[in-house]
Image (cartoon, coloured by chain):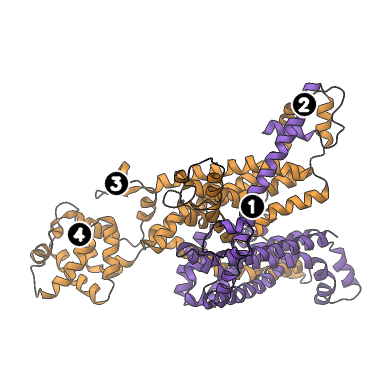
Chain colours: A orange, B purple
Amino acid sequence: MTKAGGARTNPADPARRNRLRAVGLVLPLLVFILITFIAPLATMLVRSVHDPVVADAMPGTLAALSEWDGEGLPDESAYEAVARELVEAREARTLGQVAGRVNRVQSGLRSVFTRSARSLRDVTGGPWRDALEEIDEAWADAATWHAIRATGQRFTARHYLNAVDMQRLPDGSIAAQPEERRIYLPLLWRTLVVSAVITVFCLLLGYPVAHLIAHAPERRANLLLALVLVPFWTSLLVRTTAWIVLLQTQGVANDLLVALGLVGEDGRLAMIYNMTGTIIAMTHVLLPFMVLPLYSVMRAIPPQYMNAAASLGAGPAQAFFRVYWPQTLPGVGAGSLLVFILAIGYYITPALVGGSSGQLISNMVAYHMQTSLNWGLAAALGGILLAGVLVLYLLYDRLVGIERLSLG
Amino acid sequence: MSAATGAATGTPSGAATGPSLTARLLRGETLGRFAYVAFCTLVFVFLVAPIVVIVPLSFNAEPYFTFTEGMLRLDPEAYSLRWYREILENEVWTRSLVNSLVIGVSATALATTLGTLAALGLASGAMPARRLVMGLLISPMITPVIISAAGMFFFYSSIGLGQTHLGLILAHTALGIPFVVITVTATLSGFDSNLTRAAASLGAPPLYAFRRVQLPLIAPGVVSGALFAFATSFDEVVVALFMAGVEQRTIPRQMWAGIREQISPAILAVATFLIVFAGLLLVTVAWLRRRARG
């Protein structure tokens, strides 16, 4: 505030001019990103808690249900309203969306809704309760009305509850889904475990390689670095195709194993379209992200340290663990964190080589986007994934600095 | 393995093999060195072999994904250009190449212009809330792409840009921007701002000083940022999967369809083309980097 006041007295203040210039340079891009990227993310997150379809289509029914105490069945006014609004929704062609949403809370209601709306054309007058119960006895079940009331909330936590395998019971309390109906928490857990396994593989493969490159003579180091960067720059789809070609049952790897007599012709290994395929291909894709940060840390370690350790009588293992390894920890942390973050959000590779057992959480988001069309749930799963990734990136920023992301 | 790695670290200089080391240790060290080099070789094979294997397979005369006996005998009859002919004659592939180039070049131009300007502002040190702004600008890179694609699908279709070239260009621009911002700010951090001050004191107007003094010096960073942005767009499949209609299909989107639906060696021909392209990008960026280091 005082700064602004001071600036007003002296418009030529160079600090203020520099600040304005900096803001002027950054602003176009900031606005661009806010519109083309942040706004889409925000609309998606809004969609995970906001679902107006049922509320818009059935205001009368929901008003009548607000009087209902949840015990027994609602009174005739609710039946009258729902009969009218089902027919209206059918004419407005929103019935499918409404029925689909109610069906997710209480399965079976999709057909009840569409059939009732169709049959109600022939009903000229009340009592509506009898008419509806004659069309389908689901209308005599309180669960139907609970489902309408639950989906009628504009702002709802049910997608998030659904995404962590919980549900809201008719009495309003929240409970975990029965064991056999849990889908998302096990999948989330699997994603974390697989990402951790891939990170460990990348570290085991990447550490010696980074070390070799970091301490090789310059010409050879450049050549070896190029070998790491070739996969880094090669199209992801090319690399994924390569693994399909190599690992499929009639592929190169199995042919080689058969030719070497390691497996029989009928004992060809299933290395792709399962979790094995996902892990192999993702380790390959993410390995450069481990090698590069390790390499840049190792290159800065003077070789004299190891020589000093050796001349002071340390054995090779002791010298490594007491002198070398501790100095590479920043690289180990940066590489592992980066690989882990990239792995938990990975979509393409599991989708193409994972089969049914090798799918990760991103694939479930895609499934609900494209196949089940449960966009609220897709958005909620995406929101959870995004939150997890952001937390890990904040950690990365603390430890490494986000601007120092390795870009080959 | 780690112990072997440690064993090896002492050897490159040769000086480490001092008199204090026993003969037993020496032998262990040589063995360890051998195991270490062998292991690293295997990792390099793991990294590169899958990509290299694709190239000869794309010349397969038969519609198989493995080496036929004829290919192993190096029989010229077993090799052919039929898959290359197929993609060049197939309108679906040529149109997707045009789409990829149009979308990639437009997105790169937009991302590079906006990104370089922003990097100039960010590097000046006078930007308020710099960390927050930087976080927002980099967010397209750290957001899992499936989430970006889902959000963009909802948003762009709601404003009438779903299934349009413009929509895809804007989306790819957003995804490429972090790479431009990061590479150009990194280059600018090594830029001596006294040079622009000197130009100004000699009477150069700011824009002239930027064009004649600053831009030539940061050009390698700008060009590698642009290449990153182009590579991002050229290899982007998930956003294209959600947003592109038949008219906007890009090469990666078409490859995706090819892998999912009817995988034919024609895909390997496209893949070989992309491998050559990646090699060119890699060499260019390495060359630029060396130039930037001076």
Q: Quadrant of the C terminus of chain A?
A: bottom right
Residue appearing at x 29%, y 63% in the figure? A100
Q: Given this view, does label 3 or label 2 mark the residue nearer the observer?
A: 2
Callout 4 environment at 10 Å: few (<14), some (14 to 19), or many (20+)? Answer: few
* First-in-chain label (2 vs 1): 2
Contact check, label 2 and label 1, Cβ < 8 Å: no
Vertical arrangement, residue B17 with respect to residue B107, above or below:
above
Q: Are marks 3 and 2 on the same chain?
A: no
Chain of the residue that carries numbered disc 4 in the rendered image: A
Say which residue label 1 marks: B49
Foreground residue, A220 or A189?
A220
Q: Given this view, does label 4 or label 3 mark the residue nearer the observer?
A: 3
x and y, in percent, of residue B227 in the image: 69, 66
Mark identifier at residue A173: 3
Contact check, label 4 and label 1, Cβ < 8 Å: no
Q: Secondary structure at mark 4?
A: loop
Q: Amino acid at mark 2?
A: Arg
Foreground residue, A143 or A182?
A182
Say which residue label 4 marks: A67
Say which residue label 2 marks: B27
Q: Amino acid at mark 1?
A: Ala
Question: Can the viewer see residue A11?
Answer: yes
x and y, in percent, of residue B261 in the image: 45, 64
Contact check, label 3 and label 2, Cβ < 8 Å: no
